[in-house]
């Protein structure tokens, strides 16, 4: 697909045939009521429509976006760049070149609607970002300021699911290996960080981290991981059940991380 690098997300919507329709306009107009989305889903990985019997579910815990969101709230704004709507986020885009190397990883998020008995949350958008194999964040960290890889936006499908193709993130001092994400009420709304309805983080099981970090290129993460734990991590130490991904796969064929996200 040909992108206009000056058009931002709205240009992406045009190029993919999407339009801001009446439903999207109503969602945007209801921005002041976005907290109503934070009624959530239950712990663990649920199938679509599963619940605890009375339709109640827990929202994904609200977490800090950290200092490197690139959503316009702290420096760069990746959401304004054409091409940000993509499933494979390993390469830089919008005039920048470069590819993030590392163990292949697919991140699959199942969005469920707490107002609808944990049914699929259809037509929402997720902006996801992470550090690279060396623990650097594109657009911010030394050695990666001229890259914008490992950032992208996707829309949930008719089953409430969406996925990103990426690499296993490195471990940097003070933090357990993780991925950041924000949820938006629609793809159109994802062009402005003020429209987000949830901000959270995904954590990785220790055995998956150890397996990934045993491969070439992750040598620096081995020692760093030994000095941190989920219990000491500033984000996850208050509980990680709803944010700990279910992992399948291995370093040679690639991992898949799955997480249910209540909104």
Image: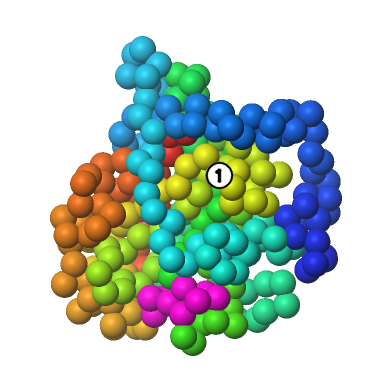
Whether residue 7 sits left or right of residue 119 in the image: it is: right
Mark 1 falls on what kind of element? Answer: loop
Point 21% across, 46% down: residue: 238
Q: Position of residue 182 (x, y in %)?
A: 50, 49
Point 67% across, 44% down: residue: 189
Q: Is residue 95 above or below residue 198?
A: below
Q: Is residue 115 above or below residue 64?
A: above
Q: Looking at this view, is 81 or 252 the one in front?
A: 81
Q: Position of residue 254 (x, y in %)?
A: 42, 64
Q: Looking at this view, is 132 or 61 the one in front?
A: 61
Report the magenta residues as a range.
Answer: 132-141
Point 39% across, 54% down: residue: 64
Q: Looking at this view, is 114 or 68 the one in front?
A: 68
Q: Position of residue 101 (x, y in %)?
A: 48, 78
Point 51% across, 82% down: residue: 144
Q: Is residue 261 above or below residue 167?
A: above
Residue at the spot of label 1: 196
Q: Can residue 85 be seen from the camera position used here?
A: yes
């Amino acid at each position: 697909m040909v992108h206009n690098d000056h058009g931002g997300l709205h240009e992406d919507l045009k190029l993919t045939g999407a339009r801001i329709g009446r439903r999207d306009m109503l969602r945007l107009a209801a921005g002041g009521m976005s907290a109503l989305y934070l009624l959530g889903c239950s712990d663990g990985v649920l199938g679509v429509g599963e619940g605890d019997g009375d339709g109640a579910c827990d929202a994904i815990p609200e977490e800090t976006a950290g200092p490197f969101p690139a959503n316009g709230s702290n420096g760069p704004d990746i959401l304004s760049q054409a091409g940000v709507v993509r499933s494979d986020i390993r390469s830089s885009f919008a005039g920048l070149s470069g590819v993030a190397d590392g163990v292949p990883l697919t991140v699959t998020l199942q969005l469920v609607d707490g107002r609808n008995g944990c049914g699929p949350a259809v037509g929402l958008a997720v902006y996801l970002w992470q550090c690279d194999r060396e623990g650097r964040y594109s657009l911010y960290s030394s050695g990666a300021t001229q890259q914008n890889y490992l950032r992208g936006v996707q829309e949930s499908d008719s089953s409430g699911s969406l996925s990103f193709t990426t690499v296993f993130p490195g471990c940097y001092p003070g933090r357990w290996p993780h991925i950041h994400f924000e949820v938006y009420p629609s793809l159109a709304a994802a062009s402005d960080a003020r429209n987000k309805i949830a901000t959270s983080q995904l954590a990785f099981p220790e055995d998956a981290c150890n397996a990934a970090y045993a491969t070439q290129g992750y040598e620096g993460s081995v020692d760093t991981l030994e000095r941190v734990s989920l219990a000491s991590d500033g984000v996850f130490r208050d509980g990680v059940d709803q944010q700990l991904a279910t992992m399948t796969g291995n370093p040679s064929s690639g991992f898949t991380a799955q997480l249910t996200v209540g909104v």
